[in-house]
Amino acid sequence: MRLERHSKAWNEIKTNDSWAIFKIMGEFVSGFEKMSKIGPCVSIFGSARTKPDNEYYILAEKVAKRIVEAGYGVITGGGPGIMEAGNKGAHLGGGTSVGLNIDLPFEQHDNPYIDSDKSLDFDYFFVRKVMFVKYSQGFVVMPGGFGTLDELFEAMTLIQTHKIEKFPIILVGTTFWQGLFEWIKSTLLESFGNISPKDLDLIHLVDTEEEVITILDAFYKESRLSPNF
């Protein structure tokens, strides 16, 4: 009897998994349709916990404003903290402000600086990350937590393995990022040989909005702006 109940429950799980495919497909279709109508953008990542009086919130706002003034739009995760700062800077600069929102039990809520027609909602992190990578011409990564690191390393892995075209990955805040960069260089590269020297070329460490724009402009003087994948 117990085995029968277990088997029935397992079959129900498999059925639910099968139907989830359609929900996942729906998120991809909706995301592709909306994002394909938006021009070239740069994604800004960082902690949802960063307060408006924090130096990196203020810097992210300045970076985003300069990005839209340079002709790009800004994509963020749509929530508070650094994401809000990115959308706010884009909004104040009169540029495209996109928010890719995720349904979370804590932290996440839409910020008020996203363009009303450019706010997308996702249930699945992996679908949302595809949108970030496919429709971004660069990643600007402010100080953050696990989610920020997840997005950073996924982009680096996809570029390293040639699954997507190379684009600039800019780490803003030398004080925050220097330790990680040195660990990658000394441990992954020099001690264990788990990456190649050229993989370090994927990363730029900067501290100002001017440096961000310089890197983006230098890269796209000779490169074509187009979706990835």
Image (spheres, rainbow, N blue to C red):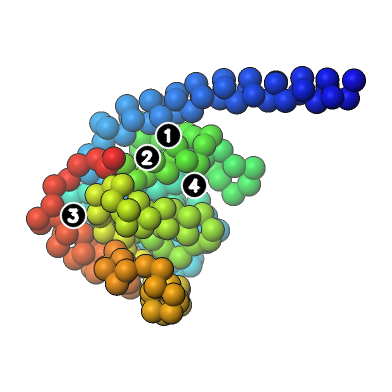
Q: Quadrant of the C terminus?
A: top left
x and y percent of residue 223 in the render? 13, 52
Asked which secondary structure carries label 4, the reply is: loop
The residue closer to the viewer here, 204 or 202, is: 202
Asked which secondary structure carries label 3, the reply is: loop
In the image, which disc is placed on residue 120? 1
Q: Earlier in the sequence, mark 4 or mark 1?
A: 4
Badges 2 and 1: C-beta atoms under 8 Å apart?
yes
Identity, as a three-letter code, of the amino acid under mark 4: Gly
The residue closer to the viewer here, 46 or 138, is: 138
Identity, as a three-letter code, of the amino acid under mark 3: Ala
Asked which secondary structure carries label 1, the reply is: strand
Q: Earlier in the sequence, mark 1 or mark 3?
A: 3
99, above or below 176, in the image = above
Q: What separation in Å lies between label 2 and label 1 (alpha carbons)?
A: 10 Å
Identity, as a three-letter code, of the amino acid under mark 2: Met
Q: Which residue is mark 4?
A: 79
Q: Which residue is mark 3?
A: 70
